[in-house]
Amino acid sequence: MQKIIIQNQEAQLIPITSLLENLPDDSSFKQYFPKDDHKSLALCFDGDTEFDCIDLDNPFDRLDADWSERYSRALDEKNTAEIERLGNLYDKQIIRLIVVQGNLSVTRFIFNDETDGACSLIVLGNLHCPDIIVGGQEIYVQQDLVVNEIFWGDYNHGELTVKGNMTAAMLIQTDYNVKVHGFKRIDTHLDEYEFDSSGVILSDLIDDEALSQSTECLNSQLSRYGMHQLLLKELPLLKEQKKTSLFANYDLSLENLRQLSHFNIIGSTDFEYRVEDVLVTVTRAHTDEQGKSWKDSLRLEQDDHEIFICAEQIETEEKETFLKKLFVTPKTNFREQLAVIWKAPDEQWYYVDEDTPAAEKNLLKFFWPNALMAAERMEQLAPEEINLCKKETEAEITVATIEYYLNLPIVLKYYNDYDDSERNGYWSDSVYFAFRQNNQEYTDRIQLTQSRPSQDLQYFPSLATEDDDSKGYQYDIQDDLKGNKNVQIRYLPHDGKGSYPLAPLDVDHYRKALGLWRYFIKHFPAHNARFEAGNWDESDPNPFIDDDDDLS
């Protein structure tokens, strides 16, 4: 072990194998690092730590600046002695792991260009950094992660684990795994496997210098070099967004409940909305027509699980002198506090405590902040934004277009009933196309779904034993009271568990539904053309062939 000074902070330079037993049990380093590798080095910082920036390709410039050039020259010259010498020098100088035994605050950015073997970072407290552009290593945060702008993780040799909550303006995943155990407050989430169907236009959000000229996959449209140059010049990666937070935080507090219950969207009494499969009911304190008084409250309902949060009055004792008691009528004082209770199978209500079942604890932990964020988003919607979304949706998703696609030969022949295991649809890249047509009991429907990330299953008690799940949208043709046909768009939070119709304020859902629909109409006609040309294998669960393939 060697003590060194890095940016005016003391660190310990030690072999990674010497500290493996002190790393979190679920960190990849602890699980997979070779126990016989005694050369690879780690830098350990004890306590809260601050840096200006961190280059994970060559942390703190430990490796000689011209090493790469010299090593490349040795390879070209086939100088085995020099190759071996530089290899040994690399092992002595390069840092493969940084461990911070406390909170880490980075003033500018964390970055690496090489996405296959960069230095890993384990923070045993909170991590705060304006921008994190990484890939090819483990980033592990024991508590909360806060990123002001962009977290971009690239390539499947790396992953991000956050044991607490994650906040970021933008999260980008390009073949990269992200596991967040707490709640996520992500303004914009871009996943390479869902990007084509998201409808997101990168140039609306990200500075032009951080983008390439490519129009291919998400990864190719982003410029790692351009981002790095902007960061070095201390310029923002994101274009200015008008989003602001109405809440100071998303803590479980009486102040936040009060603020939420007085949003304009709540109206004079109450307001219902959904967050994934959770029904949220917010009530504003009022007296109804029957004279019954209602408190400010929020109710969370998920499957058979229910949480109720309200303001309650607690009687307090006031210490009074003998003379006050003798000559003044004693007063009863009250103070308000937050009451959080859960409904048991016996229909009785109990205060949430350490003995409360895990399903109810998770319902509160994950969906209280998400309920606040969803309401905050709806409260900030401008009428013109709602009207524009409605206009675009109604113009593009019509009864005529749904009927047209439902009557194409490929649907009529193979895929007209998604409840029938032999006729239930097929995958087109990351989107599952399914249909219901000419069903005597139910409306005609096109259903487009995508796989739900496995780490999200923890949010849903009824899926605790499942290995996978999907989510998506249903595009229905239904009749109104006058017998006129119209389109209803529904959100399906789980595969086979029922859906619900979108409300006018579900603008974000409508945009996602429209993005999926545009992906569908872009690819589905070509699939039908392949079918009609005899170039379709219905026995293959994923018969998708690239649209550029020659059908002749």
Image (cartoon, helix red, strand yellow):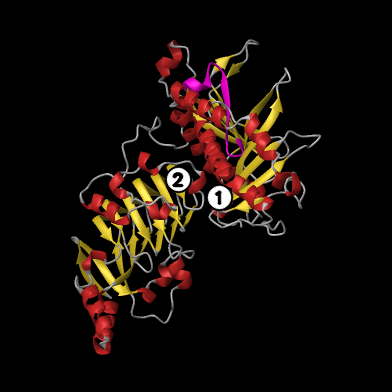
- For the point 43% across and 61% down, the residue is 155
Quarter the N terminus occupies: bottom left
Q: Residue furthest right?
A: 440
Q: Quadrant of residue 323?
A: top left
Q: Is residue 439 above or below residue 66?
A: above
Secondary element type, mark 1:
helix
Q: Is residue 474 left or right of residue 42?
A: right
Q: Is residue 456 left or right of residue 89?
A: right
Residue 113 percent across, percent down from the top left: 31, 62
Q: Is residue 258 left or right of residue 411?
A: left
Mark 1 is surrounded, within 10 Å at the Cα level, by few (under 14), some (14 to 19) or many (20 or more) other residues, namely: some
Q: Nearer the viewer, residue 195 or 283?
A: 195
Specify the amino acid type for callout 2: His
Residue 4 percent across, percent down from the top left: 21, 69
- For the point 50% across and 52% down, the residue is 181
Q: Nearer the viewer, residue 289 or 226?
A: 226
Disc 2 versus disc 1: distance between alpha carbons?
14 Å
Specify the amino acid type for callout 1: Asp
What residue is shown with label 1? Answer: 456
In this picture, which residue range is highlighted in magenta? 261-278
Whether residues under marks 2 and 1 lie with C-beta atoms below 8 angstroms apart, the answer is: no
Q: Is residue 75 above or below residue 364?
A: below
- For the point 36% across and 81% down, the residue is 38
What residue is shown with label 2? Answer: 189
Q: Earlier in the sequence, mark 2 or mark 1?
A: 2
Q: Is residue 469 found inside the magenta-colored segment of the image? A: no
Mark 2 is surrounded, within 10 Å at the Cα level, by few (under 14), some (14 to 19) or many (20 or more) other residues, namely: some
Secondary element type, mark 2:
strand
Q: Is residue 536 left or right of residue 146?
A: right
